[in-house]
Image (cartoon, helix red, strand yellow):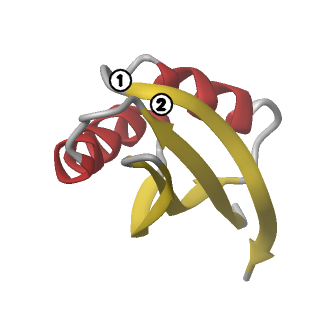
Amino acid sequence: MARVLAQFRVLLDPDTDPENVSSQIAAAVEPLGVQFMDKKVVPVAFGIVALTILLSTPEEEGITDKIVDALSSIPGVSSVELEAMSRSG
């Protein structure tokens, strides 16, 4: 089965530790067959930060909705947005 690279923007609540959320992201998406590939901490404004994360997902219908639901359930996550997708191999 082909894999898809998906980039998400995860906006964090103020005073949320991005490193703590990053470790929870990997655990939240693993049961979906999703691999956590990379992250970047991006300052937004007034002490608020976002994580730009890269995930390798199975190519299946509805997987992005499942990922958004899983990421949104993590404490400290304000919103989740799919930024880009690309088929890999």
Give the total of numbered labels.
Answer: 2
On screen, residue 69 above or below 55: above
On the image, the x and y values in percent for residue 64 come to 71, 38
Quadrant in which residue 4 is drawn: bottom right
Q: Which residue is mark 1?
A: 74
The residue positioned 40% from the left and 59% from the top of the image is 36
Q: Residue 18: which numbered mark, if any? A: none
Q: Nearer the viewer, residue 3 or 80?
A: 80
On the image, the x and y values in percent for residue 72 come to 50, 23
- Locate the C terminus by quadrant: bottom right
Task: Name the amino acid, label 2.
Answer: Leu
Q: Residues within 10 Å of mark 1 (few under 14, many from 20)?
A: some
**Answer yes or no: do the residues labelled 1 and 2 have beta carbons within 8 Å?**
yes
18 to the left or right of 44? left
The residue positioned 27% from the left and 41% from the top of the image is 21
Q: Which residue is mark 2?
A: 71
On the image, the x and y values in percent for residue 78 come to 50, 25
On screen, residue 42 above or below 83: below
Quadrant in which residue 69 is drawn: top right
Q: Residues within 10 Å of mark 2 (few under 14, many from 20)?
A: many
Task: Name the amino acid, label 1.
Answer: Ile
Quadrant in which residue 14 is drawn: top left
On screen, residue 37 above or below 70: below
